[in-house]
Amino acid sequence: MKNAAGRLVPRSVNGARQMPFATVRGISPSGTTAGTPIRSSRDYPSDGNKVVKSLKDALRRSGIRDGMTISTHHHLRNGDTLTASLFRVVKELGVKGIRWFPSASFPCHEELIPYLESGVIHHIEGSMNGALGRFASGGNMSGVGVLRSHGTRYQSVQDGEVHIDIAVIAAPSADAFGNANGVWGNSACGPLGFALADSEYADRVIVVTDNLVPFPCVPWAIQGNNVDTVVVVPSLGDASKIVSGTTVVTKSPDRQLIADHVAHFAETAGIMKPGFSFQAGAGGTSLAFVLKLKERMKSKGVKARFVRGGSTKVLVDLLDEGLTDYILDGQAFDQTGVRSMRDDPRHIATSPFTSYNYHGKGNFASIVDLVVLGATEVDCNFNANVVTHSDGLLLHGIGGWQDCLFAKCTILAIPSFRDRIPVIVDRVTTLCGPGSLIDAVVTERGIAVNPLREDLVKAVRRSRLPLRSMEEIQREVLAICGGRPAKPVVDPKHPIAVVKWVDGTLLDTVYRVETR
Amino acid sequence: MEETARSDCTVTCSFKERGGLIVDIQSKVGSLYGNAIKDQVEEGCRALGVTDAVIHIVDQGALPFVLAARLEAAVKRGRPKISAEFLPGKQPARQTRGVKDRPRRSRLYLPGNEPKFMANAGLHRPDMVILDLEDSVAPSEKDKARFLVRNALRSVDFFDAERCVRINQGALGVEDLAMVVPQFPDVILVPKCEDADTVRSIADAIQKVEHEHHLSGETLILPIIESALGVVNAYAIASSSHRVCALAIGLEDYTADIGVERTEEGRESFYARMSVMTNAKAVGVQALDSVWSDVEDLDGLRRSTLEAKALGFDGKGCIHPRQIAVVHDAFKPTTAEVEKASQIVAAAEAARKSGLGVVSLGSKMIDAPVILRAHRILRMATFGVREEDPN
């Protein structure tokens, strides 16, 4: 069926009925939130020691069986080795048809492909990056992948769309009761917010740690009262890949130029004013933007009230230099970020519940003055794609991208072409963000302000910014790249994944790519 | 096999007796531009008269002007006698050529055989873009670089920057001219220039190519002085041809030539810099300072540029786009300079109106060169004014 954005979406996905996307504001929900089976403290050890001898033991005690949903979080990022161990054990137990529900996947999860091939994992509901995305794009996954933003993942758990049977929570520090955090230990990763919903809504919760500390493990990002069993392992992953030792800002002159344009825009449009707030990712262009904005903040004597993480040294420096009162942080990307969250009370851990959740009584994201994001493609109506490339391959997850679109000003900071491939296209391969929520597109060739934002258009009209229309930039780029690229060859009868909107409706479909 | 760089492609061509054209393409952008690449290769082979050959392409997202250059180089390595050319589409000219006295605060060097930075170089708004065929190109790659630079001159929009080529020394340089001058570059940079005869012979070679291609004779020459002998002959070099628009000094080679280490303080090259600057000004052309080679050290670049400006130089070389804004900022006149220049120009204007021969400001007499300089400062101020004092 065709949804309100003009995209074809299936009526049902993996046997579950779906609602088509209707409006960016979202549908009005009804009923009550999901809950967990009622438990009693009398069934848990009175000495508080929930440690069992192995992950296999913990999974058995959790009643693991075919077709269950197992969730993990992605705070260990590309250093995660626990998830691969988890599925090795699941296979040893002879269990099949698992729905894996990660908060995101990374290139290291390429190791899971054999389990997808052998049917241990039926399908993935979460981001599919790199090799996993390529695998799914080839039509090799048994079920249809479901792509959700961080906030939408919380929504789907909270309203019962996804029921987690077993949550396996990697914890860089934990006590025997199950209290856990991510700020201490060899595998320290910062906050554990992406595991919060899992700990609160899963039937069974297993905390796995490589740093068991005596009770109490504080601060308790995950509360032991939600935890069934605790497993101690020698290592959760490769510390050097969990957080990087240093932060790398882009050296690419073109990306520096884009970053400069964004900062210039933020100042000119009057967004950079005392007490403002912003969020930028940890990509090279975003970090370069923060540094350029910082120069402007310093020279104008402007201080932010808060900035949103993922935190890096670049953000922590803002805090240390008094250029922001707080960092509200969902994940830490480098050692400095982890240390600051641990030691500085102004560096606050947040979760998708506090930041983005559709079923929350309000939304942090819409309070933020400025958010700077990337995209793989954008069309002349500012509709954007963040999961597939122009050749149709699924290669990225949504992350918090969709949730962030609700900021007061959303800017896509992107090159106008990558190698030979135009980023400004006639029609995005996959729709992830409706153009009405995207306020400006900043490229190295100029800045296009969404005409729907008459206030912004007016605010920057008489400035020295390189303002242009999307059509004009697209024309220039097509001339450079040698005309319009061919359309990707996809099989419209073979959806391999769907993209959810923040309210749980279906925004678009990703199809199998014919490989040549 | 050699690794193909991003935004580039590797083309090999084996000629056959018969069997037509066989094109084999492995491309990172194959599903999007595979057919376009095939079409372009076939068009190129028609233009070059290649009928029977096997052509292999490993492509990392090369733009069409790059693909065309790589194809032509591969074909001509196999058949050097082919005289036909495969020229990509042409950009309309953006500016008037042959303007000797235009701002040349920043000149951005781009390695002539690396296409990655070419397409967007103009976006960083340097006053000059220099496509380098000399030091940045390995001897075995000179032919490939020439096709690439020629195509870039035709196809890439460098916006308002002067389009320049640094040619090789000697006979190789004359071959370079035959290839690039028909694409009317604004300025030809002559490296390691030591005497007036070198400039004259290059001017003659340029004129010959311009004449053959019915081009108006507007290609300018920028000699780079990089040796003790060059410094001694600076006046003769600057006055050797009406095409000379400026003298530049290259300190890496100069310090090597006199047998010393190049220091940040630059005492070892102070005489050479002042000599080149003075001789250039004596002939009435611009003087351009050397490049700053530490890309990370923007504060050092800023200090060095402020010094160059204070010594009388009109520009500074850049090896990375991020240096451009720093250089332009350093060359901006200060608020105080602009204020004083405005007063001088106003006083001169008032004197002219009232028919006075002598211009004075307050109790001071103002000489003609000072008025000229004031006009220059006001012109530079159109690019922006720096608020703080240069010291």
Image (cartoon, coloured by chain):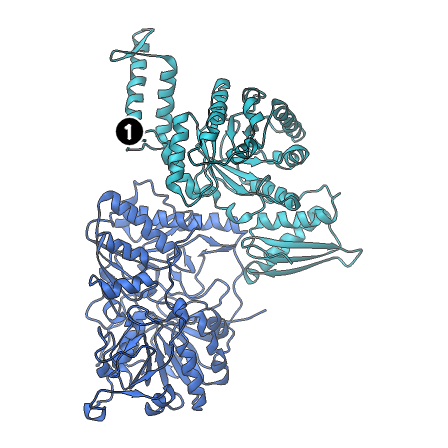
- State the image quarter where residue A18 is shown: bottom left
- State the image quarter where residue A108 is shown: bottom left
Q: Please, is residue B168 above or below residue B63 in the view? A: above
Residue drawn at (68%, 30%) of the image:
B212
| Disc 1: host chain | B
Could one spot residue A201 in this view of the protein? yes
Quadrant where the C terminus of chain A is found in the figure: bottom right
What color does chain B have in the rendering?
cyan
Relative to A47, is A515 on the left or the right? right
Residue at numbered disc 1 = B335
Relative to A412, is B67 on the left or the right? right
What color does chain A have in the rendering?
blue
Residue drawn at (47%, 63%) of the image:
A389
- State the image quarter where residue A202 is shown: bottom left
Give the x, y percent position of residue A333.
34, 63
Relative to A92, is A196 on the left or the right? left
Considering the numbered disc 1 on the image, is that residue within a helix, a strand or a loop? helix
Q: Residue furthest right?
A: B17
Could one spot residue A450 in this view of the protein? no
